[in-house]
């Protein structure tokens, strides 16, 4: 599957806003560089008129390039750098040397198209929230797993069962590869774009997606959690907090903690008793 790479000359503040908007319209991966944002979307999903309508208020022009699937490794390897989150979790590619000193957990991923290399503020904030939770013996669900980083970390932290889904076949295949690379034993991943077929309940649910998806599936996420279960979510901006809580509280969630980084927000919520 070929992808379109859109290169935008954008400030850091503009990049945050654009990522939020573009992720809602099918863009699956982003690279933030100095005064530049590169956004990736499957060629079949690219709508140039829609892109132009998003960019008009910013006065931003763009260039586009078609990238064949076979070129993804070269694209990512040229830009991917190791990430260390608080000395707790290190994320690197196989072509990088191990971290020194070693973090508590080290995840090795193949840097392909799937979102979730640890570079983005949403992923690192989710990891920071995970750092202070006990996963030992827990059942965990990762909604929109991307590269599988959060599911793999949950497994490493002692989860008895970690189930993960993503709507994108590329992400599922990438996660399967990363599970094998990291020798995680309790993680299962499959392709799905909704939670309809997911039954049973979980102790912890991870959802690093985007505002619209989180709002759409808030009740389903509550359905999948045991009483007092924990929901960690991100992919939203501080200005989205009230809208998220207006959906989460009636669904039975209570806000416990929030982390803000680079104009992105991550929330920790607790599920109440089901009536």
Image: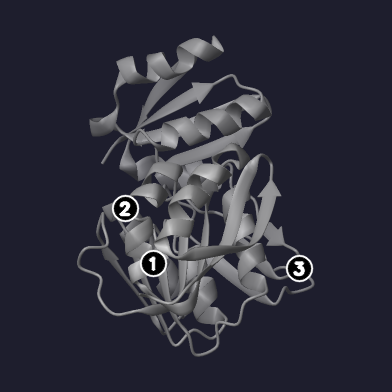
Image height of 61 relative to 135, above or below: above
Question: Measuring 48% from the left and 85% from the top, which residue is drawn there?
Answer: 138
Residue on which disc 3 sits: 87
| Residue 62 visible in the current orientation | yes
Foreground label between 3 and 2 = 3
Instruction: Please tell me which residue lies in front, 227 or 35.
Output: 227
Classify mark 3: helix, strand or loop: loop
To which quarter of the image does residue 148 belong? bottom left
The image shows residue 193 at horizontal and vertical percentages of 26, 54
Q: Tell me the CA gap for discs 3 and 2.
A: 30 Å
Foreground label between 3 and 1 = 1
Classify 10 Å Cα crowding around label 1: few (below 14), some (14-19), many (20 and above).
many
Count the labels in the image: 3
Classify mark 2: helix, strand or loop: helix
The residue positioned farthest toward the left in the image shown: 197
Q: Which mark is residue 65?
A: none
The image shows residue 231 at horizontal and vertical percentages of 50, 66
The image shows residue 200 at horizontal and vertical percentages of 29, 80
Residue on which disc 1 sits: 222
Residue on which disc 2 sits: 170
To which quarter of the image does residue 40 belong? top left
């Amino acid at each position: 599957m070929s992808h379109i790479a859109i290169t935008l000359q954008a400030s850091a503040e503009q990049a945050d806003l654009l990522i939020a908007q573009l992720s809602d319209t099918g863009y699956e991966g982003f690279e933030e560089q100095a005064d530049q944002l590169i956004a990736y979307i499957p060629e079949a999903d690219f709508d140039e008129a829609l892109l132009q309508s998003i960019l008009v208020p910013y006065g931003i022009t763009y260039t586009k390039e078609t990238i064949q699937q076979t070129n993804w490794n070269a694209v990512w390897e040229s830009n991917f750098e190791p990430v260390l989150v608080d000395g707790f979790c290190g994320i690197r590619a196989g072509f990088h040397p191990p971290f020194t000193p070693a973090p508590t957990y080290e995840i090795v991923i193949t840097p392909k198209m799937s979102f979730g290399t640890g570079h983005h503020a949403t992923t690192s904030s989710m990891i920071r929230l995970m750092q202070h939770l006990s996963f030992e013996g827990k059942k965990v669900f990762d909604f929109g797993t991307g590269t599988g980083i959060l599911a793999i970390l949950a497994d490493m932290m002692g989860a008895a069962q970690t189930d993960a889904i993503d709507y994108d076949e590329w992400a599922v295949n990438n996660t399967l590869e990363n599970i094998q690379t990291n020798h995680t034993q309790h993680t299962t991943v499959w392709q799905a774009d909704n939670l309809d077929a997911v039954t049973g309940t979980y102790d912890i649910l991870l959802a690093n997606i985007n505002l619209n998806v989180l709002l759409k599936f808030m009740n389903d996420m509550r359905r999948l959690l045991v009483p007092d279960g924990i929901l960690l979510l991100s992919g939203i901006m501080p200005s989205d907090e009230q809208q998220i809580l207006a959906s989460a509280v009636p669904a039975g969630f209570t806000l416990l903690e929030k982390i803000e980084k680079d104009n992105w927000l991550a929330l920790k919520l607790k599920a109440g008793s089901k009536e």
